[in-house]
């Protein structure tokens, strides 16, 4: 029978996924056309990258993959988030893979986040800045930016940080600072979920950022 999907994606597709796709991409330009008066604003971050010998993230370091997004944000009413956003939510993908395989999962579940951090610490933007995602439940989606960090669980992220020079942890910290989040606004998906996730989801990255 027909799969019942979360509120933002109420009708399942023919493949029983919740993803509604457009015939064409919904990239940065499409988002601006849909919401010409929306202004994506950043807060003032208190993350001290310099103290850890880290440099601020630049736009050129982000791989813009919004051309791979075919979620039509306008299908769901106002497809924007609050500006500036209130929270930066850290997720784990639940396994290995790449940014592209994570996007495939987004389409299968109908639950996209705005950013992905790969196992080497590369930062990928999937949804345009300011676009509504569906990654943390109705209490957070409208006011947050989500990042999927590729890894099975928090233990996997912590173990990899010892072999890849903390690449994923540093990438998350630099991205959060770039987007203007304070340390108090950064949360793991585990603690804010309603019992559906491991409580430690996001813990290693949140703990790392709190040291900066």
Image (spheres, helix red, strand yellow):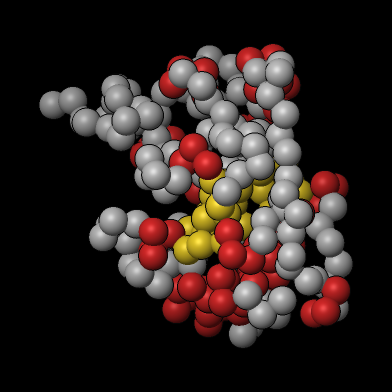
Q: Is residue 207 above or below residue 149?
A: below
The residue located at (83%, 79%) in the rendering is: 51
- Is residue 193 or residue 44 the one in the foreground? 44
- Picture quarter containing residue 88? bottom right
Q: Residue furthest bottom?
A: 162
Q: Position of residue 53 (x, y in %)?
A: 85, 78
Q: Position of residue 137 (x, y in %)?
A: 37, 44
The residue located at (63%, 66%) in the rendering is: 183
Q: Is residue 121 visible?
A: no
Count of numbered badges drawn on the protein? 0
Q: Position of residue 190 (x, y in %)?
A: 39, 64
- Is residue 152 or residue 49 the one in the foreground? 49
Q: Is residue 135 left or right of residue 7?
A: right
Q: Is residue 56 left or right of residue 200?
A: right
The residue located at (54%, 45%) in the rendering is: 144
Q: Is residue 210 left or right of residue 52?
A: left
- Picture quarter containing residue 110? top left
Where, quadrant-wise, is the C terminus in this rendering?
A: bottom right
Where, quadrant-wise, is the N terminus in this rendering?
A: top left
The residue located at (35%, 27%) in the rendering is: 9
Q: Is residue 80 above or below residue 170?
A: above
Q: Residue furthest left?
A: 1
Q: Is residue 197 left or right of residue 204?
A: left
Q: Is residue 165 above or below residue 183?
A: below
Q: Position of residue 20 (x, y in %)?
A: 42, 23
Q: Is residue 45 visible?
A: yes
- Is residue 5 or residue 96 the one in the foreground? 5
């Amino acid at each position: 029978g027909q799969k019942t999907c979360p509120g933002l994606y109420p009708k399942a597709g023919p493949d029983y996924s919740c993803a509604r796709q457009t015939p064409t991409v919904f990239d940065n330009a499409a988002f601006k056309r849909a919401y010409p008066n929306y202004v994506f604003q950043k807060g003032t971050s208190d993350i001290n990258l310099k103290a850890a010998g880290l440099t601020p993230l630049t736009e050129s370091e982000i791989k813009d993959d919004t051309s791979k997004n075919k979620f039509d944000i306008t299908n769901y009413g106002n497809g924007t988030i609050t500006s500036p956003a209130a929270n930066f939510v850290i997720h784990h993908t639940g396994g290995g893979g790449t940014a592209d395989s994570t996007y495939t999962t987004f389409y299968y579940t109908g639950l996209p986040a705005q950013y992905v951090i790969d196992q080497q610490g590369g930062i990928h933007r999937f949804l345009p800045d300011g676009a509504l995602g569906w990654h943390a439940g109705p209490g957070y989606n409208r006011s947050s930016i989500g990042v999927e960090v590729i890894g099975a669980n928090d233990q996997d992220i912590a173990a990899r940080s010892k072999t890849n020079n903390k690449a994923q942890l540093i990438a998350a910290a630099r991205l959060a600072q770039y987007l203007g989040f304070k340390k108090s606004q950064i949360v793991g998906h585990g603690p804010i979920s309603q019992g559906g996730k491991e409580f430690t989801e996001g813990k290693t990255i949140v703990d790392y950022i709190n040291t900066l």
